[in-house]
Image (cartoon, grey):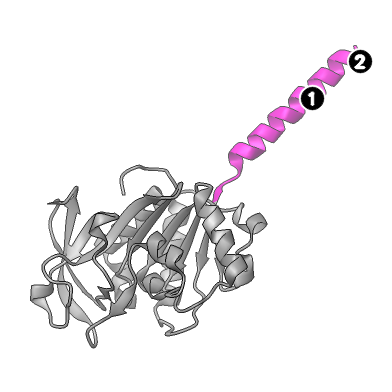
């Protein structure tokens, strides 16, 4: 009788543990530390990412504390999102923690000035795909041209935002998701092939980036929101389609 009771207790404990584990949501860390230019759109970006991530069943923490980049803390997350970070924001030990997170299968999402971060950290430049080099003065209006496997896919959509020129065209290293049309504005330096969003599998993890997101208004654009949704799904492995 005692053995039956003990067996029942063990199985009940395992069941409860399993239910608790199943009910534990995935987590996302939105990181907005800046050591350079600080975008006024960061609060809007954070609120938008929190909402979109919650819609995908993710619990979201927002931080500007570089100390959060340690192995124990990052193990709590499925994806780390750099939303308009700038400059050198992680020390060598914190950089190693992010590298280990990605190499362990973690996801990375970069928004806008995430490409203006860690210029002296070669690994990070490979993770993102390219670094910010310059941008025309003010905001630019153009068309975003979605693509799939190097071919036009879907209807181009209008955008008015700060459009980055990058230090290189990342196309050979990443899967380009969209380009912008430089012929419709002044100050572009990348020519006819100007990627603005891309993704790639990287060292065991997944990385997704969009150069849009400078202006608050962009975070109300349904096309941009869909871009972010797809990026989150890809980086968290909910979808293989980025």
Q: Which numbered tag is attached to residue 2? A: 2
Q: Could you tell which of marks 2 and 1 lies nearer the N-terminus?
A: 2
- Give SS at disc 2: helix
Residue at the image point whose x is 25% and y is 61% from the top: 223
- Locate residue 21: give its quadrant: top right
Residue at the image point whose x is 24% and y is 87% from the top: 138
Residue at the image point whose x is 12% and y is 79% from the top: 185
Residue at the image point whose x is 41% and y is 74% from the top: 84
Q: Can residue 59 be seen in the rendering of this structure? A: no
Report the magenta residues as a range. 1-26
- Most extreme residue toward the bottom is 137
- In the displayed structure, does residue 144 sit left or right of residue 115? left
Of the pair 102 and 26, the residue shown nearer to us: 102
- In the displayed structure, does residue 199 sit left or right of residue 70? left
Counting other residues with Cα less than 10 Å from the Cα at mark 2, is it few (<14), some (14-19), or many (20 or more)?
few
Where residue 224 appears, as percent x and y from the top left, is: 28, 63
- Locate residue 132: give its quadrant: bottom left
- Give the answer, above or below, for where 69 lies relative to 101: below
Mark 2 and mark 1: span between their CA atoms? 12 Å
Residue 138 counted in the magenta span? no
Of the pair 29 and 175, the residue shown nearer to us: 175
Of the pair 185 and 26, the residue shown nearer to us: 185
Where residue 26 appears, as percent x and y from the top left, is: 54, 48
Where residue 158 appears, as percent x and y from the top left, is: 16, 68
- In the displayed structure, does residue 141 sit left or right of residue 30? left
Prevailing secondary structure class for the magenta stretch in the rendered image:
helix
Q: Can residue 123 be seen in the rendering of this structure? A: yes
Q: Which numbered tag is attached to residue 10? A: 1
Counting other residues with Cα less than 10 Å from the Cα at mark 1, is it few (<14), some (14-19), or many (20 or more)?
few
């Amino acid at each position: 009788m005692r053995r039956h009771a003990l067996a029942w207790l063990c199985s009940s404990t395992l069941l409860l543990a399993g239910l608790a584990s199943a009910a534990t949501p995935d987590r996302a860390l939105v990181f907005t530390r800046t050591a350079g230019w600080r975008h006024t759109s960061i609060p809007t970006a954070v609120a938008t990412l929190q909402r979109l991530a919650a819609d995908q069943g993710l619990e979201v923490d927002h931080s500007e504390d570089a100390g959060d980049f340690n192995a124990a803390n990052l193990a709590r997350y499925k994806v780390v999102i750099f939303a308009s970070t700038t400059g050198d924001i992680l020390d060598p030990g914190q950089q190693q923690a992010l590298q280990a997170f990605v190499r362990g299968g973690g996801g990375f999402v970069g928004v806008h000035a995430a490409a203006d971060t860690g210029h002296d950290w070669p690994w990070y430049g490979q993770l993102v795909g390219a670094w910010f080099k310059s941008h025309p003065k003010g905001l630019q209006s153009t068309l975003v041209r979605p693509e799939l496997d190097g071919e036009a896919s879907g209807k181009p959509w209008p955008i008015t935002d700060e459009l980055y020129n990058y230090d290189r065209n990342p196309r050979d290293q990443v899967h380009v998701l969209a380009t912008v049309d430089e012929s419709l504005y002044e100050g572009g330096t990348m020519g006819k092939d100007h990627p603005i969003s891309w993704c790639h599998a990287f060292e065991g993890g997944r990385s997704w980036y969009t150069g849009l997101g400078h202006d608050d208004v962009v975070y109300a654009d349904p096309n941009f929101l869909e871009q972010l949704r797809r990026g989150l799904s890809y980086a968290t492995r909910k979808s293989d389609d980025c």
